[in-house]
Structures are given as C-alpha cells and as structure tokens.
Amino acid sequence: MEAMEAMEAIKIKENTLIPESEFSISLDRKKIIESEFIDKIILSPHKNLQLFLKKSYIDSKKLPQEFHEAIYKFKNNENRKGILLFKNLPLDSYIPFTPKAPLNIPEKSSFLSEKWIAAVAENLGHAISYKQEKMANLFKTLFR
C-alpha cells in the first residue's frame, strides 16, 4: 500500500519524475562546494572499493546539515513514503556512454556520482551489491 501511495506522490512531466517536497531535498550547491566533499575525487571505487566507501563516508561528514537531517529522517522512518531524492547535486563533468559489454567499466577521470551513492549508502547503513548482478559491481548504472 505504501508503494502505491509513493507512486501517487510522483508526477510525471516530460519523462522527468517530479517528487513532492515531503521526500525530496535540494541542497545548496555553494555549501556543497565549500564543504570540500567534491575536492579531488580521483580514487576509483573499481580499484579499491572499501577505501572508496570509507573515504566517501568520512568526507560526507563535511556536507551541510540538511544532508544529514534528510538521511536521519529517512533512516528513522520519519519519511513514510520510503523515497529520498537529493536535488541539485554536483555531478561528474563527464558521464560515459553505456558500455556494450555489461561487465566493462568505462574509463573516468572522476567518480563524484559514485561518491554520492557511497556517501548516502554508508550513512544509511552499508553499501551492498549482489553477486548475481554484474559480478557484485556496486556501481552499475552510472552511464548515459
């Protein structure tokens, strides 16, 4: 029943999901940039996943209070819709095309998109993946 309510709370406009403010938060880009969370993200999650997760978690502590409040509310069921959408996040300047072979990992010079996923996952609990899905690759669909 809650999943149906969540779907009703989402409006579709020009193939874009527009969430209600109850479960979305728009972070201030200036505060994010000032937080140093996005500085020098050259560590590849594909080469040393545990170190990447740890660094993403530690660096996330520098993010604005709104980030942590949203995570806390979501984690402790204050957000009854079961949806959490962060808006206005800085992303990688280059996002590669989807690789032809599903297990190929494209070359990237920065991993900001992955760092956001790792930071949210590690603040909620632990990032997980499944061996049956692309050999347990945690970051599967960060392509255009």
Image (tube, rainbow, N blue to C red):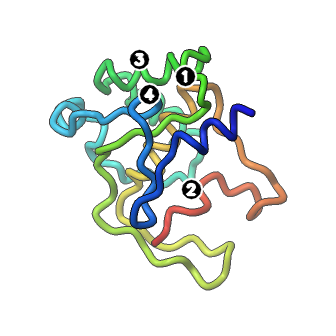
Identify residue type, mark 4: Glu
Please report contact status of discs 3 and 2: CB closer than 8 Å, yes or no: no
Labels 4 and 3: the sequence-earlier one:
4
Labels 3 and 1: the sequence-earlier one:
3
Which residue lies under the disc numbered 2? 47
Mark 3 lies on a secondary structure that is helix
Which residue lies under the disc numbered 1? 79
Nearer to me, 85 or 57? 85
Separation of residues labelled 4 and 1 (CA atoms): 7 Å
Labels 4 and 1: the sequence-earlier one:
4
Separation of residues labelled 3 and 1 (CA atoms): 11 Å
Nearer to me, 43 or 117? 117
Tell me the tag on residue 69.
3
Which residue lies under the disc numbered 4? 22
**103 lies left or right of 20:** right
Provide residue 2's location: percent of width, then percent of height.
Answer: 69, 32
- Where is the C terminus found, in terms of image quarters? bottom left
Which dot, 3 or 1, sits closer to the camera? 1
Separation of residues labelled 2 and 4 (CA atoms): 37 Å
Mark 1 lies on a secondary structure that is loop
Mark 2 lies on a secondary structure that is loop
Labels 3 and 2: the sequence-earlier one:
2
Please report contact status of discs 2 and 4: CB closer than 8 Å, yes or no: no
Q: Which residue appears at 57% of the width and 63% of the height?
A: 141
Separation of residues labelled 1 and 2 (CA atoms): 35 Å
Separation of residues labelled 3 and 2 (CA atoms): 31 Å
Q: Residues within 10 Å of mark 1 (few under 14, many from 20)?
A: some
Please report contact status of discs 3 and 1: CB closer than 8 Å, yes or no: no
Q: Which residue appears at 38% of the width and 22% of the height?
A: 61
Please report contact status of discs 4 and 1: CB closer than 8 Å, yes or no: yes
- Where is the N terminus found, in terms of image quarters? top right
